[in-house]
Amino acid sequence: MKIEIRDLRFTYPTGLEALQGVSLVVEPGEQVAIVGQNGAGKTTLVRHFNGLLQAAAGSVLIGEWDPKKYSVAKLASRVGYVFQNPDEQLFSKDVGTEVKFGPRNLGYAKEKIDELVQRALSLTELSDKTETNPYDLSPTWRKMVALASVIAMDTPIVIFDEPTTGQDALNVARIAHVIAELRREGKTVITITHDIDFCAENFERVIAMSKGRILLDGPAREILGQEHILAQTYVDPPQLTRLGKKLGLKETVRNQVEFLEIYKNHRNK
Amino acid sequence: MHERLSYYVKRDSALHRLNPLTKIILALSIVLVSIVSPWYWTAHILLLLVIVPLSFAGRVSREYFTSAIRLILPAAGFIFLMQAFFQPIGNTVIFKYLFLDVTQESLSFAFRISTRIAVMISAFTLFLLTTHPSELMSDLTRRGLPPQFAYVIISTLQILPQMQAKAQTIIAAQRSRGLDTESTFFKRAGSVVPLVGPLVFGSLVEVEERAIAIEARGFTSKSIKTSLHEIPDSLSDKIIRWVLILLVLLSIALKIWLS
């Protein structure tokens, strides 16, 4: 489902101008990472996608829907949103019921709900924990429950707000796997992140925001190479990208595989 | 985004710089003098010639007048009406309404009482406007108030805005999962558990974390603690406090002597 944002502006009641004219098109099935310092407007921007915030000026289109004309509950059938802190949404006595909550709200048929829940649970490796109380799980697993509870809603667009914050390497790998699966299914994934390595390894397109505006928007390879502009929003390129620059590699590298390949060519010359 | 729970207005003024204890004593002595004083006009004089100028000295006159209109005037007005109608004193009837007599005496009594109420609320409004709650508490703790008591007061002021913010996030998270919080009554009634559950769990966890955090900083330690935040208590503070106490004693003496 296509997302089209035109000259979006938003000001909080406190007078803080969080968005100062943001324009953006996300094609169906794209994987986008949004980076930028705290207060850059990342969360404010994505909260317009599912109607939690409403544009003060400019327009938002989710498919052909204008979020202003639909309730958040209705928009939830198009845009799934995983909040940063799982503890702010988990309430059920077991994981299975928790994951079922979203799809049930959307009014799917019983068979479809069961199927979606099974799929979400196996994708997040929670299948053996369906009977467990979410609060008996470790915080990393609670994060997976939150992921599963939104994935089970089967929305064409999924938003993750800081999915890897406070997660161990194993769980970051699990989250990366979930995102790869969603890509395979043709879903749009938009992720807010401060974890630039995670961003480099899993996303094709990167948007850098600063002070309510889009600073850079393009293929990850191009964006991550622009050290000086990224520095404006306090983002450091990934370690390997910086190492590659230091070694004088011609191309911008994003991950180990690229680094080894390009470095080999570089040495052979 | 947080709603303000304390009245405190951060500004720099002579009143703000006074020690919190001095300001409590100031407020208390204004109230006491207005009650104890034998003269009818003391409360009015205090209101016009002490409290109003103090609000200017504290640079909070605008806030003071807003709260005067919103809070003090309605409260004093209500007291005035109640007293004027229901006080069964005096014979000089000014007018009758059903079985209620409004006499000259009851009117003057009502006027006196309602001015006193206005003085009381005003004195403490000024105090709250110019004193930060945590400054007050750390000063009182240093003077021997049990820290547990101070903690209860301060944490209540801090936790409520935090809980409000948390509740907002929970509502946003559950609406994003398709929870209907807007339509029919039955649908909304069903949405209570998903909203209250995380709020209660989260708050319980937070209480525990707070307890551990303050204990890690030696909250119940019996040894004498120093404070990073020094609250000034100057010689003039001490002089003001003694003068105020003397004034209160003087008005009590006057009351006894004149009656």
Image (cartoon, grey):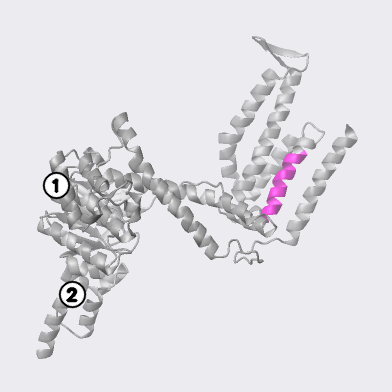
Residue under the image location 71 percent in, 34 percent down: B116
Residue B67 quadrant: top right
Viewport quadrant of the C terminus of chain A: bottom left
Amino acid at pointer 2: Asn
Give left or right: position of B120 versus A81. right
Q: Is residue B112 magenta?
A: no
What's the distance in space between the residues labelled 2 and 1, CA to CA? 35 Å
Amino acid at pointer 1: Glu
Q: Chain of mark 2?
A: A
Is B9 or A180 nearer to us in this picture?
A180
Residue under the image location 62 percent in, 43 percent down: B125
Q: Earlier in the sequence, mark 2 or mark 1?
A: 1
Q: Is residue B29 magenta?
A: yes
Q: Which residues are magenta?
A: B18-33
Q: Give the numbered dot on residue A115.
A: 1
Residue under the image location 57 percent in, 50 percent down: B152
Residue B112, image x and y in percent? 73, 29
Task: Kindly identify which residue carries mark 2.
Answer: A255
